[in-house]
Image: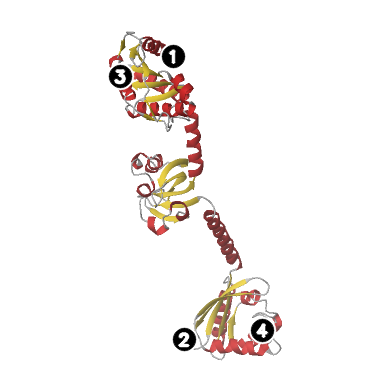
């Protein structure tokens, strides 16, 4: 029996020596009965501690205490610490804890009591894992700080377009993350009036990449927030589509600034109407549309009557009030598809889409009557109200004609001259050169 037992013991020792971690086994009397070389290496126990055979738990605990394995202690404290280690072992409770050794390594120690008394312990060097966890924690903390202190939030959706993860959304849109989790991205962030046609939504449906697309969204309070969206579709290892992962950046301030610059660049600062540049761009687009559809295009030139007399008599401030009143009358009596621009001084130009000469003349007459009947409040005690009129020149550009905008305006200007010559406050057609009152 002795030889088989010895062989069994040798085999067991060989097996545990090949295990990656340290292993020990103590009996009920706290005597070590098994350990492997990895245990001795991990804990840096000297060979002298094992010279007389496997040591007791107290011998190991006392050695550890004396070399500062459990931290600093006062004189006589090593004995107390060793006694405490042995006392805890007598409770035979399963345990898992981490211990950082004086050399900087971190061990995970797992203990499990044995049915017949005693216990087995496994020691694993988790130093690298702890470093990786710490590095990951630092990266996450840095990301969270960056998101918290920047106009950015990150998000993920499932295959159905529902939010599965959000971070940083509250300080941009006012929604708590819990408000949006499980909700459709499109229905919660896009303007409901154009959500279905949102370019971001279209690309997500097509599972395309999105790079810095600017869309108008709504905050929890209902305010417009402009977001620059970048996102990528996500697929699992089998190639199945699982959703989207993206980042939104609040670009409201820069978007509004750009819109303001565009407003300045394309609109008259006094009246808010389109300026020459915007009118020119729109004219070119309407000419292309006319070439496709073969429809007429009508221009109306408006020149305020006796405007120099208004400025000379009542001053330029009253003159500006009158120009703004004219602009309001013209814009409020036109279709949304038409365009009215201030073309300089007291001249205004109107572009009527899909309107022939007769229709253009009728629109001009309606505008003439509306302006003639408008009372303009001047704010002056001497002249609290004014009424002004204008002369209108109408011309129609047919699809067969190839004229520049300047040439068409010159034709309308001739009609205005005819209206002025006929007594002002009239509509005159360039084609007929006949004025009407």
- Looking at the image, is mark 3 or mark 1 earlier in the sequence? 3
Secondary structure found at label 1: loop
Marks 2 and 1, how far apart at CA: 102 Å
Q: Is residue 27 visible?
A: no
Instruction: Identify the residue position indicated by label 1 in the image.
Output: 404
CA gap, disc 3 to disc 1? 26 Å
- Would you name the residue on which mark 3 appears? 365
**SS for callout 4:** helix
Quadrant in which the C terminus appears: top left
Q: Earlier in the sequence, mark 2 or mark 3?
A: 2
Earlier residue among tags 4 and 2:
4
x 51%, y 79%: residue:
95
User: Which tag is nearer the camera, tag 3 or tag 1?
Assistant: 3
Residue 65 is tagged as 4
Rounded to the nearest whole Å, what is the CA distance between mark 4 and mark 1? 98 Å
Q: Earlier in the sequence, mark 2 or mark 1?
A: 2
Q: CA distance from mark 4 to mark 2?
A: 29 Å
- Mark 2 or mark 3: which is in front? 3
Q: Residues within 10 Å of mark 3 (few under 14, many from 20)?
A: many
Q: Residue 102: percent from the left, percent from the top?
A: 67, 75
* Residue behind mark 2: 115
Q: Is residue 66 visible?
A: yes
Disc 3 to disc 4, C-alpha distance: 106 Å
Q: Mark 3, mark 4: which one is toward the viewer?
A: 3
């Amino acid at each position: 029996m002795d030889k088989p037992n010895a062989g069994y013991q040798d085999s067991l020792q060989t097996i545990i020596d090949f295990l990656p971690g340290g292993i020990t086994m103590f009996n009920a009397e706290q005597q070590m009965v098994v350990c492997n070389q990895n245990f001795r290496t991990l804990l840096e126990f000297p060979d002298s501690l094992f010279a007389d055979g496997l040591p007791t738990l107290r011998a190991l605990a006392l050695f550890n205490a004396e070399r500062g394995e459990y931290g600093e202690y006062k004189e006589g404290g090593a004995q107390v610490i060793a006694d405490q280690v042995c006392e805890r072992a007598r409770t035979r409770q399963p345990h898992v804890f981490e211990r950082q050794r004086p050399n900087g390594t971190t061990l995970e120690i797992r203990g499990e009591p044995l049915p017949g008394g005693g216990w087995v312990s496994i020691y694993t060097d988790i130093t690298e894992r702890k470093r990786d966890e710490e590095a990951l924690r630092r990266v996450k903390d840095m990301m969270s700080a960056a998101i918290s202190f920047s106009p950015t939030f990150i998000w993920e959706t499932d295959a159905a377009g529902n939010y599965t993860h959000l971070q940083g959304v509250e300080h941009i849109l006012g929604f708590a993350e819990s408000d949006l989790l499980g909700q459709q991205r499109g229905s919660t962030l896009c303007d409901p009036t154009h959500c279905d046609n949102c370019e971001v939504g279209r690309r997500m449906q097509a599972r395309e990449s999105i790079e810095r697309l600017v869309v108008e969204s709504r905050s929890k309070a209902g305010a417009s927030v402009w977001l620059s969206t970048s996102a990528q579709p996500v697929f699992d290892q089998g190639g199945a589509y699982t959703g989207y992962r993206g980042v939104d950046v609040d670009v409201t301030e820069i978007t509004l600034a750009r819109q303001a610059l565009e407003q300045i660049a394309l609109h008259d600062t006094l009246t808010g109407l389109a300026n020459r540049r915007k009118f020119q761009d729109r004219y070119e687009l309407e000419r292309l549309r006319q070439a496709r559809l073969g429809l007429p295009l009508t221009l109306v030139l408006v020149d305020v009557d006796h405007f120099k007399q208004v400025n000379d008599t009542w001053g330029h401030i009253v003159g500006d009030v009158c120009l703004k009143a004219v602009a309001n009358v013209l814009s409020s009596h036109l279709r949304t598809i038409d365009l009215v621009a201030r073309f300089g001084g007291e001249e205004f130009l109107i572009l009527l889409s899909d309107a022939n000469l007769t229709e253009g003349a009728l629109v001009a007459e309606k505008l003439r009557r509306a302006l003639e009947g408008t009372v303009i409040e001047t704010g002056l005690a001497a002249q609290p109200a004014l009424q002004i009129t204008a002369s209108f020149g109408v011309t129609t550009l047919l699809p067969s004609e190839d004229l520049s905008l300047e040439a068409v305006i010159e034709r309308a200007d001739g009609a205005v001259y005819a209206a002025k010559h006929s007594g002002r406050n009239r509509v005159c057609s360039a084609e007929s050169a006949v004025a009407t009152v």
